[in-house]
């Protein structure tokens, strides 16, 4: 039961970060501010949900695969954020 | 709670819906690109949440892995084509990026 409570808490925090990232994507005034919202939702939100799914996973190989998914999303989203920020420069 | 998975899934789908608003109404193509990336990562989270329910083999995690790799790869492909197409006359140091 403690495991279920921890997993539910992690899922709630992760979904909270995803919602904050989506609302930030909607409400921020500039492309570069929206990049901030996107990376917070991607990295921390997916990290919390991946941690909850790892605790809930059936076997060790599934847990390691979930952590691999999180690491790939981390690397990919940081790469893409840098490229997008460089490709659309600020005109101030 | 046995039904928390469904509540979490509905929450993530609502997050996807909010993200799609920026895809439609984004003023620049960069906004639309970023919003599609967020929707794709939310899809990965959705598949991870359902991992406990459907335990017949590792197929769900493989789909999540493919979706997680597809987002950045598509974005890099789009940016390479866009950088090749636009004239880089407003670069600061004058060289082609």
Image (spheres, coloured by chain):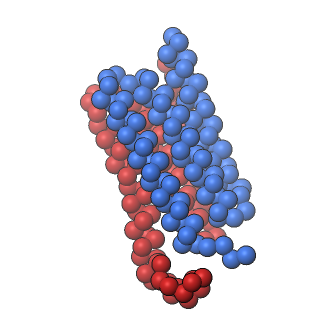
Q: Is residue A52 visible?
A: yes
Q: Residue at x 44, y 29 (%)?
A: A53
Quadrant the C terminus of chain A occupies: bottom right
Q: Residue at x 54, y 72 (%)?
A: A87
Looking at this rendering, what residue extends furthest in the left direction? B57
Q: Quadrant of residue B63?
A: top left
Where B12 sits versus B28, above or below? above
Q: Quadrant of residue B57?
A: top left
Q: Name the tint of chain B in the rendering.
A: red
At which x and y percent is residue A6?
54, 20
| Residue A41 falls left or right of residue A50 | right
Viewer-proximal residue, B76 or B17?
Answer: B76
Where B7 sits versus A42, above or below? above
| Residue A71 falls left or right of residue B34 | left
Chain that appears blue: A
Looking at this rendering, what residue extends furthest in the top direction? A1
Where A91 sits versus B26, above or below? below
At which x and y percent is residue A4?
51, 17
């Amino acid at each position: 039961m403690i495991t279920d409570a921890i997993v539910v808490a992690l899922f709630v925090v992760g979904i909270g970060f995803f919602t904050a990232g989506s609302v930030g994507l909607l409400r921020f005034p500039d492309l570069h501010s929206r990049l901030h919202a996107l990376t917070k939702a991607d990295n921390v939100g997916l990290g919390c949900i991946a941690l909850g799914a790892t605790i809930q996973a059936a076997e060790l190989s599934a847990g390691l695969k979930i952590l691999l998914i999180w690491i790939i999303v981390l690397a990919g989203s940081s790469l893409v954020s840098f490229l997008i920020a460089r490709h659309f420069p600020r005109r101030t | 709670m046995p039904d928390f998975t469904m509540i979490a899934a509905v929450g993530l789908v609502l997050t996807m819906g909010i993200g799609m608003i920026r895809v439609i109404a984004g003023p620049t193509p960069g906004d639309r690109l970023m919003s599609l990336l967020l929707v794709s990562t939310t899809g990965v989270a959705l598949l991870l949440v359902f991992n406990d329910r459907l335990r017949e083999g590792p197929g769900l995690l493989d789909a999540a892995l493919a979706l997680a790799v597809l987002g950045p790869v598509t974005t890099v492909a789009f940016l390479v084509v866009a950088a090749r197409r636009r004239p880089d006359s407003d670069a600061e140091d004058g060289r082609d990026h």
